[in-house]
Image: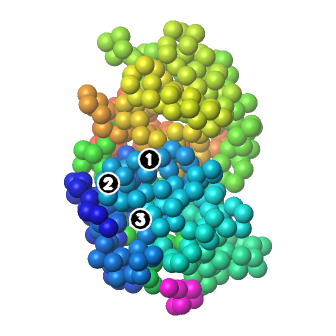
Amino acid sequence: MALSTQTLRPYQDAMLTSTGAARLAGQNRVLIQAATGVGKTTVFSSLPTYLAPWLDELPARSRRMLVIAHRDELINQAVERITQNNPDLLITVEKGDDYAIASSDVIVASIQTLDALDQRRLERLMQGGHFGLVVVDEAHHSAADSYRRVLAKLGLVPDPAGESAFRDLDDQERSRRINERMAEWDKVAPKDRLLVGFTATPNRSDAVGLSVVFQTIAFSYPMKKAIADGWLAPPRALAVATAESLDDVKTTAGEFNQKQLAEAVNTPQRNALALMHWRQHAIVEGTPLATLGFTVDVKHAHDAAAMWQSAGYRAMAISGKTPKVERRALLRDFQSGQIDGLCNAMLLTEGTDLPRASCLVHLKPTKSATLYEQMTGRGLRLFPGKTDCLVLDLVDLSRKHSLMAAPVLYGLPPLLNAKGKTLEQLEEEVGALADELALADPDRVHV
């Protein structure tokens, strides 16, 4: 395969060497954990070159790379970056109406297409040889049955259908049985192929762990470390107390019931409160900070955007229901500065690079630390003139639920109010206060 000309950052180079070391140690299903915005796509676009000596030992038709993703934005981003960094490779797409050339050096495919129609399209791609290298982007999704069925077809994991007898067991016993099954699989699994997963958040909100797919986390580069090293912008946090109560909102699979949540928080007074605090803190010398708002559902996104528009700001709603052409235009206009803010309904949590974003408004309460980190990571990419990212958390009344807010990113109690300080400053203040009071547990400190 062709050589890549890109220059990697030190931690990106470490991701590659850790992957290679894991393979040499006999592990062929490895996970790389790295914070949103530190260039995971750049790393896996370097794998064909880095692993070329090993790939060249495989039969010619098996030296190919397959990249699996679940969203158009992720697929387009992967194709663009791999092409940019490996201009001599043939890269094609398998998704919907797009059919890849089976002999391509790299095929980027949607999980939905690979798993559809009894995997007939995947079988077509595998005729004549397996894929030596398989990459799963946003790999925290890979424990889902659709991913595992595809990975089983690729010869990387056992077929999840074999676990049907475990489904009625409690989580602990089910996990034990699956881990035993994976250990037996590893004794007979083919070793002439490598799976590498990339994710910012290896934890899942359900009871299914990623050990059903991966053997090890080969490398970890968390958000806090990336901020300290200067590769991400530090979050500057502000909590805004609302009058809405979440006590009547039920929990479904560990997270708020989204329909009930939208009814509780999508109110004119709460949206107006968010706008008021945004105007107070997110307008610098008369210019609004480029803002991403995270909402519960599509109606919430449109209602919030309308509130901003009524005050004279260039805000737009965007969601999975927005037509693709319009979606691309909105993202382009936001990045070029023609739009002040995008209110999005679960669209920009993964796979979208918007480094201009320097303010986040969390209009959507969540109980998931994983989802909260995914959303907040969208505003931490570096950009010229950007020194930090303002994070506005709307904190509703809640006696029954534990809400996530910016301090959790630094391991602090979520309801500490940073009052506009960076999380690093908040952490230092809490540590100093804990030392002063001789407390062993900072959770007992309230600032």
Q: Which residues are magenta?
A: 183-190
> Of 233 and 327, which appears nearest the observer?
327
Q: Quadrant of residue 268?
A: top right
Graded by Cα atoms within 10 Å as few (under 14), some (14 to 19) or many (20 or more), the crowding at tag 3 reads many
Image disc number at residue 271: none
Residue occupied by mark 3: 105
Residue occupied by mark 2: 87
> Of 76 and 200, which appears nearest the observer?
76
Magenta highlight: main SS = helix
The three-letter amino acid code for the residue at tag 3 is Asp
> Of 127 and 328, which appears nearest the observer?
127
Task: Pick the quarter of the image with the C terminus.
Answer: top left
Q: Magenta span has 93?
A: no
Image disc number at residue 77: 1
Mark toward the viewer: 2 or 1 = 2
Residue at x 32%, y 72% (from the top left corner)? 51
Task: Pick the quarter of the image with the N terminus.
Answer: bottom left
Place of residue 308 in the rendered image (x, y in percent of width and height, measured from the top left): 55, 16
What separation in Å lies between label 3 and label 2 (alpha carbons)?
A: 11 Å
Apparent side of residue 183 relative to residue 236 in the rendered image (left or right): right
Position above or below: 270 against 426: above
Element type at mark 1? helix
Place of residue 337 in the rendered image (x, y in percent of width and height, measured from the top left): 39, 22
What separation in Å lies between label 3 and label 1 (alpha carbons)?
A: 17 Å
Dot 3 or dot 2: first in sequence order is 2
Q: Magenta span has 184?
A: yes
Apparent side of residue 48 relative to residue 28 in the rendered image (left or right): left
Graded by Cα atoms within 10 Å as few (under 14), some (14 to 19) or many (20 or more), the crowding at tag 1 reads some
Place of residue 159 in the rendered image (x, y in percent of width and height, measured from the top left): 65, 77
Dot 2 or dot 1: first in sequence order is 1
> Of 124 and 173, which appears nearest the observer?
124
